Image (cartoon, grey):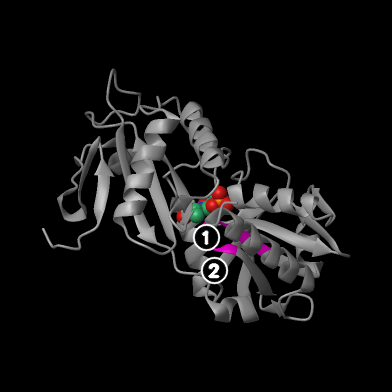
């Protein structure tokens, strides 16, 4: 083992990444039969851990997979990984699959889930992206009817993101029946006449932890914020468009479908919310 090799968690053991092995019959590998979470860790502290764990449980319940660990077990496992990965901001990835069994679509009897977790450095948002914003394209939402489950089966999301990249954009904003759902790996906000708007949570989008926090922070700071249906026309005509996720925080979209959003620069409401978000992170780093 190389001295500085990353330590990961697999099925109850901590081991070097290069020694972590899963069977080719794992249902995650064969079917994409599993769920996952991505949790930021700022200054060694897991960010919104309870909320991420609640969403994990909801995903597990939706696919009828038992959670082998208590919240205290998870905290212990994930904190150990964050500590072993050294200083600096990190992002924890965890996934559970329906375990190893002969290939058959129906659930196997009495199989142990496969549990894997790792922590990776999470670089601060790139100053260039914050200064200039990013490009996005709107695309038809080709995914299934259960996008609220954080499934490891991400083929549709991958194809959509790649289609955006092929068009020199960093994200695809997805449209179902004329309404905005979310990004390929992010939630979407717009600003219209000073009001923040984001789609209502339903089975067509992931209930983003960052999304929920922004709604909460907007309310706490008296910034008008609506959870509502958003049409594609509203998206295209918006003064500001933002994307949110655990790894990208809040990014301004300044080009949509190759046209400028508003005046083509990150907007004042984004700037305000970004500042509030960073201040909130700092309070977690330095508990009173
Ligand atoms: N993705 N919607 C989708 C489809 C996502 O994949 C993600 C995050 C989000 C934002 O959720 P949150 O704020 O809880 O990160 C919304 C993660 C980061 C990923 O797959 O890497």
Q: Is the residue 168 above or below the residue 50 in the image?
A: below
Element type at mark 2:
helix
Q: Decide if residue 251 is on the left or right side of residue 40.
A: right
Q: Is the residue 182 above or below the residue 239 in the image?
A: above
Q: Decide if residue 44 is on the left or right side of residue 142.
A: left
- Residue assigned mark 1: 160
Q: At x 38% / y 46%, what residue is drawn?
A: 79
Q: Is the residue 200 above or below the residue 130 in the image?
A: above
Image coordinates of residue 168 in percent, x first then y, are 54, 77
Q: Which residues are magenta?
A: 242-249
Image coordinates of residue 72 in percent, x first then y, are 42, 32
Image coordinates of residue 65 in percent, x first then y, are 41, 26
* Dominant SS in magenta: strand
Quadrant where the N terminus is found in the figure: bottom left
Name the one closer to the observer, 114 or 122. 122
Q: Magenta segment: does it hold 8?
A: no
Which numbered marker is on residue 69? none
- Residue assigned mark 2: 164
Q: Magenta segment: does it hold 244?
A: yes
Contact, CB < 8 Å: mark 1 with mark 2?
yes
Q: At x 56% / y 40%, what residue is drawn?
A: 51
């Amino acid at each position: 083992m190389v001295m500085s090799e990353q330590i990961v968690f697999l099925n109850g053991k901590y081991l070097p990444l290069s020694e972590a092995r899963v069977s080719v019959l794992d249902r995650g590998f064969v079917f994409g039969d599993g769920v996952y979470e991505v949790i930021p860790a700022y200054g060694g502290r897991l960010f919104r851990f309870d909320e991420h764990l609640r969403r994990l449980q909801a995903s597990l319940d939706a696919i009828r997979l038992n959670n082998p660990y208590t919240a205290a077990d998870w905290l212990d496992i994930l904190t150990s990984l964050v500590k072993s990965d050294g200083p600096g901001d990190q992002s924890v990835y965890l996934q559970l699959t329906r375990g190893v069994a002969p290939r058959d679509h129906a659930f196997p009897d009495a199989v142990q889930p496969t549990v894997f977790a790792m922590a990776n450095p999470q670089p601060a948002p790139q100053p260039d992206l914050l200064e200039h914003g990013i490009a996005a394209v709107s695309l038809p939402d080709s995914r299934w009817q259960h996008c609220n489950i954080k499934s490891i089966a991400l083929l549709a999301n991958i194809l959509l993101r790649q289609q955006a990249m092929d068009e020199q954009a960093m994200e695809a904003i997805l449209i179902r029946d004329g309404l905005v759902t979310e990004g390929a790996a992010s939630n979407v906000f717009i600003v219209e006449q000073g009001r923040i708007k984001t789609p209502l949570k339903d089975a067509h989008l992931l209930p983003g932890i960052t999304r929920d926090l922004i709604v909460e922070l907007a309310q706490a700071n008296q910034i008008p914020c609506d959870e509502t249906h958003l049409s594609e026309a509203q998206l295209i005509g918006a003064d500001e468009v933002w994307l949110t996720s655990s790894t990208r925080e809040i990014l301004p979209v300044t080009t949509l479908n190759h046209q400028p959003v508003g005046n083509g620069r990150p907007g004042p409401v984004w700037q305000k919310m970004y500042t509030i978000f960073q201040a909130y992170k700092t309070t977690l780093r330095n508990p009173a």
